[in-house]
Image: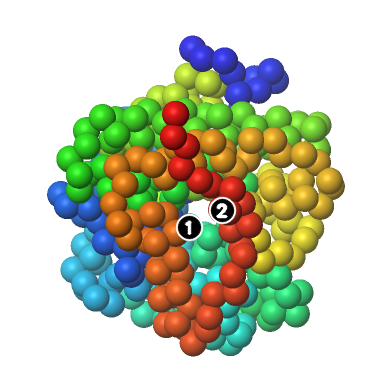
Amino acid sequence: MSEPISPNGPVKVAITVDDFLQWKMVPFPTGYSAERVVSSLTSAFADFGITDCYAFFSTGPMEEDPSLREQVEAWCAAGHHVGNHTHNHASPDWVPASAFTADIKLSEDYIGSFIEAAPVKYFRYPMDMWGAEADKVADIHHFLAKENYIPAPVSYWFYDAQFVAPYWRAVESADSDAAAWLVRTYAETAVDQLRRHAAVSREMFGRDPIFISVFHGTAVTSDSVRPMLEALVAAGVEFVSLEEGMRDPLNALPAPMHTRLFRNSTQKWADHLGVSFEGTPPLETLSRMEEVSPREGMSYEDVFGAMRNHAAKEVGGTVAGGEFDWQSAVRPIHD
């Protein structure tokens, strides 16, 4: 057993998965697919006793490939559930409230029956961005309340989306050493970031809350999920359902600030209370990933910048810019 996450005993974590269909403008690497990812996740979850896991994914890829519905069916057949994550994966700060809520409804055209079949009708904001304008947030929450949706926040993440581009580059370059390093680092970063989130939470609230985690259904996740779950268990993590996680007041209550910045709820509380959150994001790790298997046009910003711009355009808006305020500090490190 590795060093425990908390000196107070086991830490409860509700696992959720975002975007296992990936996104428009971000295809799977050669040899990978949504089918492979869903199979890997459901198999690993079964072995680790993770049941009733909620997946939140933008349905835009289903517009281009209706057969992806089969992977949603496979996910639910394995005993898991589906929530709404919009159709195009745009931040509410990029579009009017009416366009954002219309995008939520559009997603129902593709997966509405799965959403309604879940024990709880959850919605997750793309990138966990709830919006910076109080009036717009109120309008969206009015819509969610009318439609019987409960917003499901993220209170712990480890920047797994930043692994997508370097792993894609490593796969396309047949760089097995780089791929192996990324898989190891994925698991190590998951544990390190949970340890930091837990320490900050104890400082702010005097206890270990139930954390609602997220990682994305990507190629790197499909190859890293088992070592990552093993590392979390070894550090004293107990997996629980999202419903149990939502019974913790720190998840049931919205974080006390509106921001356009990329922050989960724990980070928002820390910003609000003026508590330092050292090592989050893990800038040195993210910088090292930028130099993995370099390929023209395939940096993190190349890949996800194009995705975000396309998502905003599809909903009739534009990317506000500056949301990822830490990204400017991520630079390749050459030893």
* Image coordinates for residue 280, horizontal then vertical, percent: 63, 40
The residue lying toward the viewer, choosing from 136 and 114, is 136
The residue lying toward the viewer, choosing from 284 and 60, is 284
Whole-Å distance between the Cαs marked 2 and 1?
Answer: 37 Å
User: Which residue in the protein does label 1 denote?
Assistant: 119
Location of residue 148 with respect to 290 vertically, above or below: below
User: What colouring style does the render use?
Assistant: rainbow
* Amino acid under disc 1: Pro
- Residue drawn 79% across the image and 58% down it: 256
Quadrant position of residue 192: top right
Q: Residue furthest front?
A: 335
* Image coordinates for residue 27, horizontal then vertical, percent: 26, 61
Q: Describe residue 93's horizontal placement relative to residue 188 as left or right.
A: right
- Badge number at residue 327: 2
Q: Residue furthest top?
A: 1
Q: Describe residue 136's horizontal placement relative to residue 121 as left or right.
A: right
* Image coordinates for residue 223, horizontal then vertical, percent: 28, 37
In front: label 2 or label 1: 2
